Image (spheres, rainbow, N blue to C red):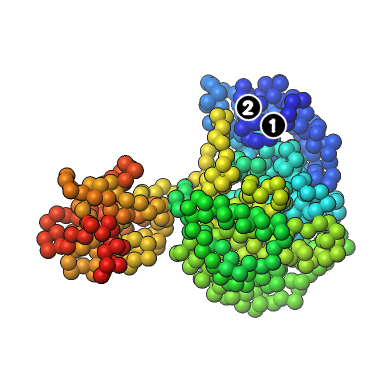
Amino acid sequence: MPATPRTIADWQAVFQDGLTEAASTVLRAQRERLAAIGLPIYLHVASAEELQSQLQALAALATGFPGAAERQAALPLLGVPFVVKDNIDIAGVPTTAACPARTQKALRHATAVQRLLDAGAVWLAKTNLDQFATGLVGTRSPFGAPESVLRPGHVSGGSSSGSAVAVARGDVPFALGTDTAGSGRIPAAFNGLVGLKPTPGRTSSAGVLPACRTLDCVSVFAHRADDAAAVLAVIEGPDAADDYSHFAPGPAALPDTLRVGIPAVMPALDDASALAFDTACQQLQAGGHRLLPVDFAPLFDIARLLYEGPWVAERHAVVRELLARDPGAIDPVVRGVIESALPFTATDAFEAQYRLKALASPAQALWQQLDLLLVPTAPNHPSLAELAASPVAANARLGTFTNFVNLLGWCALAVPVPASAARAPTAGVTFIAPGGMDAALARLGSAWLAEEATAAPRAASPATTPTLPLVVVGAHLSGLPLNGQLTERGARLRQATRTAAHYRLYALPGTVPPKPGLLRVNDGGAAIDVEVWDMPLAAVGSFLALVPQPLSLGSITLASGEVAHGFLCEPAALAGATDITAGGGWRAYLQSL
């Protein structure tokens, strides 16, 4: 057969004319290829009959559309193959979680799988994992240990080992994993992939055998950030079948100039991870972004709660019956991790919740000064031999920069570092953002990887909150007294810029806190420094209620020519006001006082 399609767009091209026999033959050949590969990557490959059943169901779905555009809109992933980690249910197929003694045939699809099938995608296999999703190495499985595709002899990363390796090999354009402590990010780094870890609750976990039910996320591996985003757009959304479903779309984009937090004191890194991180920092600075050292100690303290605190009891809750009945059925290392939950009491659980709450407050406060965090995805990439010599300590070290993210309800995107790929092929970096920033992170990832647009149709983008661009000129600027009126409503800074040269700025007398007035003029205007904030539409009304006379909301033309709503002043209020236009902006005026 010709070269295997590698991305979603490649597979969309195969099926651009619908479910033709020629296109279906390509898919059948791919299934046969996976069946020939088998262990340790694939625990169950769709039989020829299972694939044919899917194609017949798709053919029924695809009929009745008047043209290709309508078919694409209804079935955006028509014919696109995928695989899933074997703790995610596919109806009629055993779910093992890499524990043969626990094998159960699923009665229905996991919600994420069902949504992909409804979009026209085709499942081809279930993949290996660290048993019960307990591990970041990918070796804790009785079915064998997949190796890094880019660095043989080294771990694939886990627990979503098989899913990452399947995509890295080019067997499928995307795969589903899960992420509790980093399982959707570490394997991405070790295989040169994008690993999208959504905000907890954004993707349903119904039909997923839990690791830690309160923290688990269904994650996505892909070669391209826009492919991962296309998959997220399909699988995200509220789900009544998941008690922890919490779907809250966020902004579509990050600010043009980013404030990026990096560890003020970096834990020890191997040469490859250090090179990748340094390269990423240089790339950001070259793009005009600011790097700000941050004390990561509270984040590392939170990370320790995940395995050193009572959250490990969530893992025990999943396997307690098997552990009591047949402890030998569980991998010894996994069993040791899970049995560490036994000494904890209910009191310990509440005390850990109090500790997390106390640590979370300063952690969440970081977002008042930052837009993103940048970290190495992993501090090192252990070989299989190194792991065998120290299976627990080597695994624990891998979670240095991942364990705290889900405990805080944040989202993350692991990406390769292209400039260092030749010297550090399996060391990437991870961007971390507040919960709800998934769509903006994916957009950043696409720009980071310099992904070229494709002419092929795609699935929709992840959902975002509708916003109104708001131009502020005075006390609402970042760090000034009224800026909290924006941030407490979820507004995000888009850019610092200037108006067109049609305005004059005045310091208004008697205002508390001091405020300026911006006036549009026909002649003698100048460009004034402003900020543009994206305000959620749902919060605009409550914000407008706070705007006092003589200020009002009108249309302001920016230096780029864009017109946006912003603060203007009634001309009658300028009697006795001081013209401060020459300073160029409100901050300059304040500094001159």
Res 13 label: 2
Q: Residue at x 62, y 74 (%)?
A: 352
Crowding at dot 1, Cα within 10 Å, few <14 / some 14-19 / many 20+, comes out as some
Q: Which of marks 2 and 1 precedes in the sequence? A: 1
Relative to 23, does residue 545 appear above or below in the rendering?
below
Residue 209 seen in the current view: no
Q: Is mark 2 on a helix, strand or loop?
A: helix
Q: What element carries label 1?
A: loop
Residue 313 visible from this viewpoint: yes
x and y percentages locating residue 125 in the rendered image: 76, 40
The residue under label 1 is which amino acid type?
Answer: Pro
Image point (57%, 39%), residue name = 451
Q: Report which residue position mark 1 lands on.
A: 5
Question: What residue sits 32% from the left and 51% below the top?
Answer: 498
Residue at the spot 37% in from the left edge and 62% down from the top edge: 478
Among the 4 quarters of the image, the one containing residue 277: bottom right
Relative to 209, does residue 460 appear above or below in the rendering? above
Disc 1 and disc 2 in contact, CB within 8 angstroms: yes
> 314 or 482, which is in the foreground?
482
Name the mark on residue 471. none
- Vertical side of 263 occupied by 554: above or below: above
Residue 297 location (% of width, % of height) = 60, 72
Q: How far apart are marks 1 and 2 (CA)?
A: 9 Å
